[in-house]
């Protein structure tokens, strides 16, 4: 049964409803009234099940702001016009709206929710039914750990591999693949450990397709451990079917799913006719200099070709399979020092204040439209990240001002075009400056009609019924280094709602589903759809 919850993300009653559903282990889709997923057709569907008075919230400020004649006119409109009016002013709707095949519930009412949802299996029950269809095993966390991807994810989470220390996570991964004939190589660059391990099908030629699962074993620091509900390195699966721990979403669960999908695929199709590799680093969350970037450079020096790469970064927003990243924006940081003349603040004519001189130039930089993006990328953005000047004294004009900013840029730009535009603006304002540039990634895009995007999209749709959104937004990932080889690169992994947060977690069900999608992707690429 499909369960949908409609409302506004910042509404207290909506938050309570979402927490209640999550605590009960009920899978649901959340549709924000202000997002594109909310359409007037949803309201029209409600009108086939209930009266208008049940939908409209007479206590809302929007309703009270209408005169009696305006209220009457709204209620007298056709279903289509009424739906459109509420879609344009959703605060008129009683919220949240719980929509199920058994009916609608307006406002959060725990008793009504329990009644309408009582026949829907919880996440825990669905997991148990998937693992033990006959029902002959009790529902405990131990039974979930019998699933190989979940068991491996737990083991990986229990390793406190904070960047850049792998702490033995990569040897554990290789041990899971060794019996299949994967040939492993540890590539150590300074303090960073990288795993490059390859399996070749029997008789596969050197020019046969090469598919790579790319990921990382390093995690960000936990923050205050006493603020976590569970030990961040426990790998605990709770009674609601959540897998807890640092790296559970970003991205040890994906790595575990890689391994189990590969193992199952190779066992089922030993003559698949290609090469499957894993590229795992301990430096994705850090500087990302001696990790995937360095490995790719080594592979290119060897003449190693990469055809397809699936990066397991958490990409989904509301439910598994709703978003895949078929590209990313480029990232470039500029560090500018504006030179002035230090002096006494009471004698400005004897000094030159670099902050004052920077101000109009900075205003122009902030106000510049760098481009309008394109069909697949949002417009290039400019953001100031740091601005420093002064000695700390109240009576000293600073001798210099340091500005740091970042561009996230689309394929409409190159680092060179942006640098030239910035330089022209600084020169136009007559500044005395020095500038340093750091390009941490170039934009890339994998065609939507390419083999990899099609294989992953079809695997998602086959297993979940969702048609994923193709997206190029967000930050950077190690996919930017691999894309420079000419490989088709795509990112797909679990929900990103808790990544880098206190109490990071992921639904155990999603890891089981993710493993199946990765497996089906391999089938689609090598065996055929």
Image: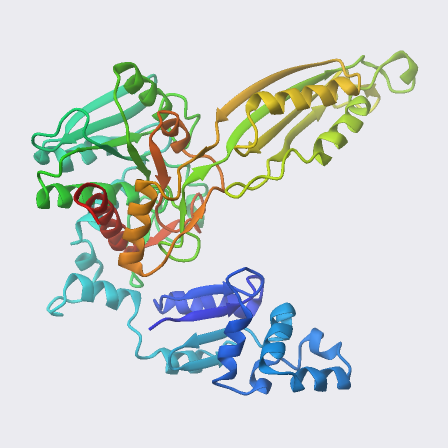
Instruction: Say which quarter of the image contains residue 223.
Output: top left
Residue 242 is at least partly visible in this image: no
What colour scheme governs how the chains and residues are painted in the rendered image of this protein? Answer: rainbow
Asked whether 19 or 90 is in front, the reply is 90
- Residue 275, placed above or below residue 504: above
Image side of residue 62 versus residue 83, left or right:
right
Measured from the top left, where is residue 354 in percent x and y? 78, 19
Measured from the top left, where is residue 74 in percent x and y? 68, 82
Instruction: Say which quarter of the image contains residue 335.
Output: top right
Image side of residue 476 versus residue 333, left or right:
left
Measured from the top left, where is residue 486 in percent x and y? 35, 27
- Residue 257, placed above or below residue 428: below
Measured from the top left, where is residue 134 in percent x and y? 11, 69
Residue name at image x 90 percent, y 12 percent: 350
- Spot the residue most to the front: 449
Image side of residue 369 versus residue 171, left or right:
right
- Residue 13, placed above or below residue 357: below
Residue 108 is at least partly visible in this image: yes
- Residue 332, placed above or below residue 476: above
Residue name at image x 27 percent, y 40 percent: 255
Quarter of the image where the N terminus is located: bottom left
Instruction: Say which quarter of the image contains residue 346.
Output: top right
Total number of numbered discs in the rendering: 0
Image side of residue 275 versus residue 456, left or right:
left
Asked whether 511 or 275 is in front, the reply is 275
């Amino acid at each position: 049964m499909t369960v949908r919850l409609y409302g506004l993300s910042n509404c207290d009653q909506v938050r309570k409803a979402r927490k209640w559903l999550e605590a009960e282990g009920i899978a649901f889709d959340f549709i924000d009234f202000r997002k594109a997923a909310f359409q007037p057709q949803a309201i029209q569907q409600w009108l086939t099940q209930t009266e208008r008075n049940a939908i409209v919230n007479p206590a809302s400020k929007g309703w009270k702001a209408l005169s009696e004649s305006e209220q009457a006119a709204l209620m007298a409109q056709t279903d289509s016009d009424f739906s459109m009016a509420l879609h344009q002013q959703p605060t008129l709707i009683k919220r949240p709206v719980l929509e199920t095949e058994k009916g609608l519930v307006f406002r959060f009412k725990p008793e009504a929710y329990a009644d309408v949802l009582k026949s829907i299996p919880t996440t825990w029950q669905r997991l148990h039914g998937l693992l033990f269809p006959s029902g002959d095993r009790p529902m405990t966390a131990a039974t979930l750990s019998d699933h190989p991807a979940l068991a491996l994810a737990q083991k990986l989470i229990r390793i406190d591999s904070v960047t850049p220390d792998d702490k033995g996570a990569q040897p554990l991964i290789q041990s899971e693949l060794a019996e299949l004939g994967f040939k492993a190589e540890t590539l150590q660059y300074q303090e960073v450990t990288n795993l490059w391990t390859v399996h070749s099908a029997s008789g596969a030629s050197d020019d046969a397709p090469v598919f790579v699962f790319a990921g990382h074993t390093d995690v960000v620091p936990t923050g205050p451990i006493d603020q976590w509900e569970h030990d961040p390195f426990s790998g605990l699966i709770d009674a609601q079917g959540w897998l807890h721990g640092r790296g559970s979403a970003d991205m040890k669960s994906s790595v575990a799913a890689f391994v189990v999908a590969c193992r199952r695929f190779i066992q089922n199709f030993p003559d698949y006719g290609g090469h499957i590799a894993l590229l795992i680093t301990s430096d994705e969350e850090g500087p990302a200099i001696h990790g995937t970037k360095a490995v790719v450079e080594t592979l290119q020096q060897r003449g190693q070709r990469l055809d397809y790469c699936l990066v397991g970064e958490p990409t989904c927003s509301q439910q598994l399979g709703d978003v895949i990243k078929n590209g990313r924006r480029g990232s470039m940081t500029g560090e500018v020092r504006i030179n002035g003349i230090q002096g006494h603040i009471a004698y400005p004519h004897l000094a030159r204040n670099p902050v004052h001189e920077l101000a109009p130039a900075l205003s122009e930089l902030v106000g510049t439209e760098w481009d309008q993006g394109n069909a697949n990328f949002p417009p290039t953005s400019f953001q100031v990240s740091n601005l420093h000047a002064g000695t700390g004294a109240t009576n000293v004009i600073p001798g210099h001002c340091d500005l740091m900013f970042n561009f996230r840029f689309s394929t409409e730009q190159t680092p060179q075009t942006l640098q030239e535009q910035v330089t022209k603006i600084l020169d136009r304002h007559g500044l005395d400056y020095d500038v340093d540039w750091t390009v941490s990634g170039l934009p890339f895009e994998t065609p939507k009609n390419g083999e990899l995007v099609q294989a992953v999209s079809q695997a998602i749709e086959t297993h979940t019924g969702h048609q994923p959104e193709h997206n190029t937004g967000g930050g950077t990932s190690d996919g930017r280094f691999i894309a420079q080889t000419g490989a088709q690169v795509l990112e797909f992994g679990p929900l990103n709602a808790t990544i880098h947060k206190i109490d990071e977690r992921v639904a155990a069900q999603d890891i089981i589903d993710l493993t199946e999608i990765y497996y089906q992707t391999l089938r689609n690429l090598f065996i055929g759809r």
